[in-house]
Amino acid sequence: MVQGVTKNLRVVALCLLVGGAAAFALREPSAPEAPPVVPVDAGVPSGGPGEPTRDTEEHLARARPAPDDDEGAWEQPQPRPDAADVWCEGLSVERCGEYPLDCEVAVYCDEVRFCRRLDRNQEQETCAGEGMRLGSRACCPGLVARCGGEWEDAPRGAEAGDTSEPLCIRCGDGVCGVFEEARGCPEDCATSEARPKVHYRGLLPEGPSWVSERNATPGQCLDTRPGPNEVEACLRSWSEALFGLRDADALLRVENLAPFTPFDIDLMRCLERGASYAERRSETSREGCIEALYRRTRDSRLDKLRWFSTLSRESR
């Protein structure tokens, strides 16, 4: 009898163990399988000899997940269905025309033609707008293609090895705009004895974007800015916004300087000079030039910029 009871207890214990394991399996779902590891260069085709591929960065950009829209992030660019897998910059001019949806033939200022990728932001436009590279499209009406740019110091033109490109500019309208300069558009920008001053026009004819009631004119830069560097930056912002020019000497060629005054230009010229403790008494330094301007104008607003007045206040 004892053996029968023992056998029954063993059966009951075995049933409890099996039932508990089944219940645990039902309660705990199996962990999901790990996603397959995608190599970093996934989606980047490997081109064989003579078959250049697109830039690797472009393919990696496509593979990156786009951030959430509510965070103000950029939208993930999608490849065009009919896009060819070609590196335009590696193609000859003769083969460039085989990919009209991706590549275009352009020309340098030395008249050498080359192949480059079409700008996707402009591929739907039928002409090149103001300040845009010429490329395979003609300039929009009212614009002409010229070599030259204010941001370049060296002369530009049809010279061997010149890798700059012609820009579409509004040359010939009597106004020297921000994309024009004397070398590329002498009609509008070059000065002469007969025309010592030119009509300049910047991108912001109403003034810098931060203009307010307290900063309604360039002259108020001296009132509202605390130090020489800040005053200089304020005056330069006005000059760039109104005329597309960055220095005081260039302003001397402007036909109508308003709202700049001669005092504003003299101050800007002083602030453009380097500070020098050793040469502070010479007008070639910033300190000496400001001191000379004060003696000439007796404008008390210059006190906060004068090295001598600052020194005298510290010695009291």
Image (cartoon, helix red, strand yellow):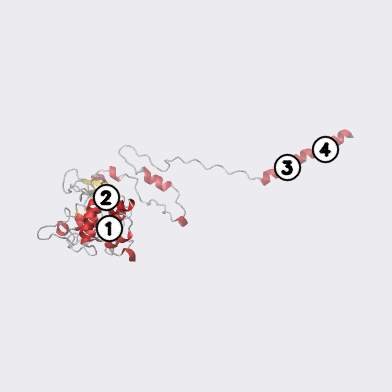
Q: CA distance from mark 3 to mark 2?
A: 72 Å
Q: Which residue is under mark 4?
A: 9
Residue at image point 40% right, 45% down: 60
Question: Splitting the image into 4 quarters, where does residue 90 fall?
Answer: top left
Few, some or many residues within 10 Å of mark 2 (<14, 14–19, 20+): many
Few, some or many residues within 10 Å of mark 3 (<14, 14–19, 20+): few
Q: Nearer the viewer, residue 69 or 220?
A: 220
Mark nearest the camera among 1 and 4 is: 1
Residue at image point 29% right, 45% down: 88
Question: Splitting the image into 4 quarters, where does residue 304 fall?
Answer: bottom left
Q: Nearer the viewer, residue 298 or 122?
A: 298
Identity of the amino acid at label 2? Glu
Few, some or many residues within 10 Å of mark 4 (<14, 14–19, 20+): few
Mark nearest the camera among 3 and 1 is: 1
Task: Give the left or right position of residue 132, taking residue 31 as reference.
Answer: left
**Which numbered disc flags the more N-terminal residue, 2 or 1?**
2
Identity of the amino acid at label 3? Gly
Q: CA distance from mark 1 to mark 4?
A: 105 Å
Residue at image point 65% right, 45% down: 28
**Which numbered disc flags the more N-terminal residue, 4 or 3?**
4
Mark 1–mark 4 CB contact (< 8 Å):
no
Which numbered marker is on residue 104? 2
**Which numbered disc flags the more N-terminal residue, 1 or 4?**
4
Mark 4–mark 3 CB contact (< 8 Å):
no
Compared with 258, 138 (above or below) is above
Mark 3–mark 2 CB contact (< 8 Å):
no
Residue at image point 76% right, 41% down: 16
